[in-house]
Image: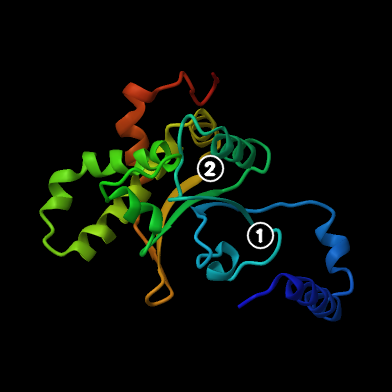
Amino acid sequence: MLSYDQVFENNRAWVAERLAEDGDFFEELARGQDPLMLYIGCSDSRVTAEEIMGAGPGEVFVHRNIGNLVGANDLNSMSVITYAIEHLHVEHVIVCGHYGCGGVKSAMQAEDLGLLNPWLRNIRDVYRMYEEELDALDDPEARYDRLIERNVQEQCLNVVKTASLQRSFLRYGIPRVHGWVFDMRTGALIDLEIDMEKMLEGIRRIYDLGVHEQGGQ
């Protein structure tokens, strides 16, 4: 188990290892970031974005919260998405859930969780939307896994609904939105193959923000 004091020992060893490989590593790192991807994942301590993707410092812009949610009234996630698209010009936005998600499991239970209630309501809303499909699954684990996948899909849709995404995609063709699930049982990343363009076309009538190829909001 990692101790508090060990963190600083590990940091010193990491610095030495990096400098041994590249004496200019930290000088280059300090110059700025130019990531191609925004990763929106769960806060679960077992799911670290860079490690499961094999990415290094500066390669992925990361936002994490309980249940990998993208809420329209969550200024944190909205600010991250806006900054990543409009200032970092990322080419991909990834929403990554994971099997065994505690947030999703909590949302499936009839229990008062206090301050977590309004946050987990977002996942309960996903369950309500797919209630017939989910309740048709007799295996509780299969139902749990499927809700995790459906939650990722709906959070991808929430990204597509944003003005930043619509404006950038219609003008420049980027970023693309992807939905992934990390399977901790095997270590595999699973691409849910979200059809972003179909998703965007399906919501334009209701969620059209007046954003067009030649104009903006």
Instruction: Please tell me which residue is depicted at 35% across the width and 27% down the height of the picture.
Output: 204
Q: Nearer the viewer, residue 83 or 89?
A: 83
Of the two numbered discs 1 and 2 in the rendering, the one whose residue sits closer to the viewer = 1
Residue 134, position as x, y percentages in the image: 17, 51
Whether residue 197 is visible: no
Q: In the figure, is residue 23 to the left or right of 72? A: right
* Residue 26 drawn above or below residue 9: above
Q: Which of the numbered marks, if any, corresponds to residue 174?
A: 2
Above or below residue 103? Residue 123 is above
What SS does tag 1 mark? loop
Q: Which mark is residue 81?
A: none
Q: Residues within 10 Å of mark 1 (few under 14, many from 20)?
A: some
Viewer-proximal residue among 73 and 159: 73
Q: Which mark is residue 59?
A: 1
Residue type at the position of mark 1: Glu
Quadrant housing the N terminus: bottom right
The CA span between labels 1 and 2 is 17 Å
Along the line of sight, the residue nearer the viewer: 184 or 208:
184
- Image spot of residue 89 (x, y percent): 63, 42
Q: Is residue 214 above or below residue 101?
A: above
Q: Mark 2 packing: few (<14 Cα in 10 Å), some, or many (20+)?
A: some
Q: Quadrant of the C terminus?
A: top right
